[in-house]
Each structure stands twice: as C-alpha cells, then as structure tokens.
Amino acid sequence: MQTETVHARTQGRQNKTVADVMHHGAVTCTLDTPIPQVARLLTQQDVSALPVVDAEGFLVGILTRTDLVALRAYEDYWREMQAEHVMVHTVHTITPDQTVAEASRRMTERKIHRLIVVEFDSAQHAKPLGIIAQSDIVRDMALE
C-alpha cells in the first residue's frame, strides 16, 4: 500500500510540465533597446536575463547580466550600444507542454541556467511566454 502511494507521487512529479513551474510572462527588450535601459530592466524587474524580440514580438536573441558585466570592460562604448549589438543569437528554448524533467536535462547538458518558454506560430517563429530557470525547478522541489 505504501509503495503504491510513493509510486503515485513519483508519477505526478515526472509528468509535471514546464507550464506548472515557469515564470509566466517574459520581460523582454527589442533589438534597438539601449544597453543602459537593458541594465535598468534587469535591475528593476530583478531578472537575470531578457529575451530580445523583433518588431513582431518574435524571439531573436537573449541578453544576460553576465553579458552586461563583460561589456563594462569597454567603458567608452557600452553606453552607446543597443541590444542587437550584444545579444546572443542562440537561444535555448522549450515549450510549456514539455516536462520539468526535460527542462532539467537540457539545462544540465547545456550547462545553462534558464530556458525561454516559447510557443511557435505556423511559420515556426517563436514567441516568448516566460522563463523556466534552475531556481524555479529547485523551488518546485522544495514544495514537494
């Protein structure tokens, strides 16, 4: 009897989706957002990364606090730069219907701290819906 209860709880955890633990609603910036404004957004929203979107709201890159810290070395230039000059073009994504276990595997294998949660339109353009970070997964583990 006790084994069945443990098995049922384990099954529920394995089937938990990204949508169950992610931060819904991504704070984003656009390609032409000035870097000082990016820094303010990261600070004011208390986030460590911003998805960069184009004029239609489709995901085109990502900027992290680490990217900005690296920029600070170029004292004469960073204030004049925009998101498109600094962003990383390769963005690791996941959809909300995938499992938390899959998100964990991707983060571990790629040695990254977060995945941008997206939905794809008919042309396979990605729109950011939110973020799932390592801290979200650990928080969820603490609640179980």
Image (cartoon, rainbow, N blue to C red):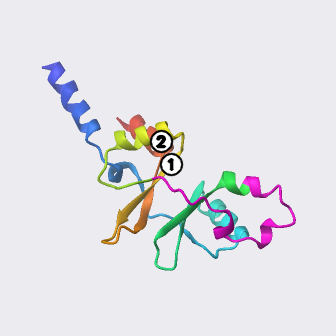
> Mark 2 vs mark 1: which is more N-terminal?
2
**Which residue in the rendered view is the most extreme toward the right?**
76
Is 61 in front, or is 42? 61
Mark 2 highlights which residue?
Answer: 107
Residue that mark 1 sits on? 114
Q: Quadrant of residue 40?
A: bottom right
Q: Tag 2's secondary structure?
A: helix
In which quadrant will I find the C terminus? Answer: top left
Q: Is residue 82 magenta?
A: yes
Q: Residue at x 31, y 45 (%)?
A: 99
Amino acid residing under circle 1: Arg
Residue furthest left in the image: 1
Q: Which residue is found at the position 54% from the left and 39% from the top?
A: 111
Is disc 2 in contact with disc 1, using a CB cutoff of under 8 Å? yes
Q: Residue furthest front?
A: 123
Residue 37 spot, x, y in % from top left: 68, 70
Q: Is residue 47 visible from the viewing direction of this image?
A: no
Q: Is residue 26 magenta?
A: no
Residue at 63% of width from left, 62% of height from top?
Answer: 87
Q: Is residue 72 above or below residue 52?
A: above
Q: Position of residue 22 (x, y in %)?
A: 41, 52
Taking 82 as reference, is 61 above or below it? above
Q: Which residues are magenta?
A: 69-92
* Quarter in which the N terminus is drawn: top left
Residue 65 at x, y = what percent? 66, 54
Q: Secondary structure at mark 1?
A: strand
Q: Where residue 97 appears, x then y in whole percent? A: 29, 53
* Left or right of 142, for residue 36: right
- Mark 1: few, some, or many residues within 10 Å (few <14, many ≥20)? many
Amino acid type for the residue under numbered disc 2: Met
Q: For this view, does 143 lie left or right of residue 69?
A: left
